[in-house]
Image (cartoon, rainbow, N blue to C red):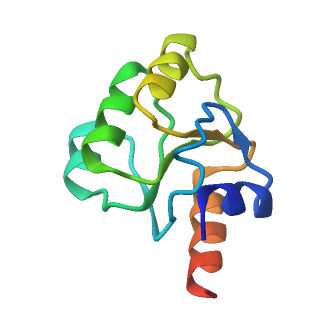
Amino acid sequence: MTINQLSQKLDLKIVSNTPKTTEKAVTGVYSCDLLSHAMAKINEGDVWITVHTNLNVVAVASLTDCACVLIPENIEIEKQTVERAIEKDVILLSSDKSAAVLCYEIFKLIKDL
């Protein structure tokens, strides 16, 4: 499943869209708000769910090569974070759902493939 397909199935808003990255494959899901821990545990292809919206999120996403970053609960994403994400080809997604619900829904979609 691609980021684009995932966003359509779960009604996720693509906040930082670059053509190169929306076709990235989604292979897992990981939720963590401690950046250093996330950096050590995120796998390539994971959707990383976090409430953080600062520039460091883009750095961690780039280092881990996660598929995308998903911000739950309609948390506002800082403008400079969106700009940096576009520069670094990091997809930021947004949802009104909680992190727990998103983890469940993403895992269910991936498991059923």
For the image, the number of numbered tags is: 0
What residue sits 59% from the left and 23% below the top? 77
What residue sits 58% from the left and 52% below the top? 99
For the question of whether residue 69 can be seen, the reply is yes
Seen in the picture, residue 25 relative to 90 is either above or below; the reply is below
Q: As drawn, is 48 to the left or to the right of 12?
A: left
Q: As drawn, is 75 to the left or to the right of 35?
A: right
What residue sits 48% from the left and 19% below the top? 81
- In the displayed image of the protein, which residue is found farthest to the front? 20
The percent position of residue 96, horizontal first and vertical second, equals 75, 42
For the question of whether residue 53 can be seen, the reply is no
For residue 33, which quarter of the picture? top left
The percent position of residue 58, horizontal first and vertical second, equals 38, 31
The percent position of residue 40, horizontal first and vertical second, equals 19, 52
Look at the image and tell me in which quarter the C terminus lies: bottom right
What residue sits 38% from the left and 31% below the top? 57
Seen in the picture, residue 79 relative to 105 is either above or below; the reply is above
For residue 107, which quarter of the picture? bottom right
Seen in the picture, residue 112 relative to 7 is either above or below; the reply is below
- In the displayed image of the protein, which residue is found farthest to the top? 80
Look at the image and tell me in which quarter the N terminus lies: bottom right
For residue 35, which quarter of the picture? top left
Identify which residue, 108 or 22, lies in the foreground: 22
Identify which residue, 31 or 55, lies in the foreground: 55
The percent position of residue 89, horizontal first and vertical second, equals 45, 35
